[in-house]
Amino acid sequence: MTSSTLIATRESRLALWQAEHVRDLLTQRFGMSVELLGMTTRGDQILDRSLSKVGGKGLFVKELETALEEGRAHLAVHSLKDVPMDLPEGFELATVLEREDPRDAFVSNHFRSLAELPQGARVGTSSLRRVVQLVALRPDLDVQPLRGNLDTRLRKLDVGGYDAIVLAAAGLMRLGLAERIRSRFEAAQMLPCAGQGALGIEVRSDAHALLAQLAELTHQPTWFSVQAERAVSRSLGGSCSMPLAAHAVWHGDTLELQVALGHPTAPLSPLLRVTEREAVTTDAGARALGERAAEVLRAAGAAAYLGAAAEQRAAP
């Protein structure tokens, strides 16, 4: 390992906070000398189209992986919700840190909660998962696309483009913006997506010494939770064109996994929901829980929803 470890990171304020957080952990825990390599990804550049139309969330990580592959950086820090379920050959998820609040946040300058919004209020979100759940809660609202980094989205709210927006609570909290949160959606209202609130560190598979060190930072309960969540999406062929939510919580030694699937082109269609539980002690057990939840979802009628998502991906 070189004397200086380089972290590849997006250059948004939140991404830099996350990279700096990992830098400080590595310095405190291992005495590493760590520098940041800031990069702009395709996902940051394309703001006029939905992610489902331009390649999905993988657009936020591809350039960082190229930096790892070329040796310009040693590790990349990601919001785990942005990481594709299957990494390219030669890359590995080395560790997942303890999760921040995984819930979605209701942000508004004039209203305290979703229930307070008047009929026809304009609500912004970047996520199909949030769209279908918002429509299930309030079909009378005008839900509109909202792209850009966290600061950009808040600015669009503040200039009057929306009556409210929905963001991940974790990002707001990490940037010291918790006061912008008017209320938080509980899982029964709006289920988070796989990995929401967790930070993951990606490295090359041949970086054996770094892999061993980073493994010491793993928060095991979070690791098992996100393994189960990501297994659902992997089993169903999840992508940005699939409104899929998957969230696992611990009850003692038992991991409870809740999953919700909406229709990608008919948001007024009923949400399909399943809940599975298992005592999980291994990676294989966590993945098996997620795979079982996916099969139960298929049995509940998911095929039509998945087929519509596939057609949407194939559309020009």
Image (spheres, grey):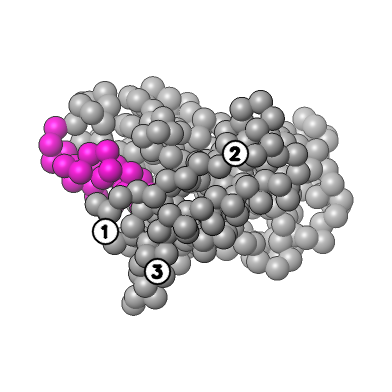
Q: Is residue 154 left or right of residue 203?
A: left
Amino acid type for the residue under numbered disc 1: Ala
Q: Position of residue 152 (x, y in %)?
A: 35, 44
Q: Amino acid at mark 3?
A: Gly
In the rendered structure, find residue 266 and report the number of the disc placed on it.
Answer: 1
State the SS at label 1: loop
Q: Amino acid at mark 2?
A: Arg
Pointer 1 with pointer 2, Cβ within 8 A: no
Q: Earlier in the sequence, mark 1 or mark 3?
A: 1
Q: What's drawn in magenta, residue-wise?
A: 118-145
The residue furthest left is 119
- What residue sits 36% from the left and 53% below the top? 262
**Mark linked to residue 307:** 3
**Under tag 2, what secondary structure?**
strand
Above or below, comparing residue 26 to residue 41 in the picture: above
Local crowd size for mark 1, using a 10 Å CA cut-off: few (<14), some (14–19), many (≥20): few
How far from the left and from the top, in percent, is residue 297? 47, 54
According to the picture, the residue beneath numbered tag 2 turns out to be: 277
Q: CA distance from mark 3 to mark 2?
A: 27 Å
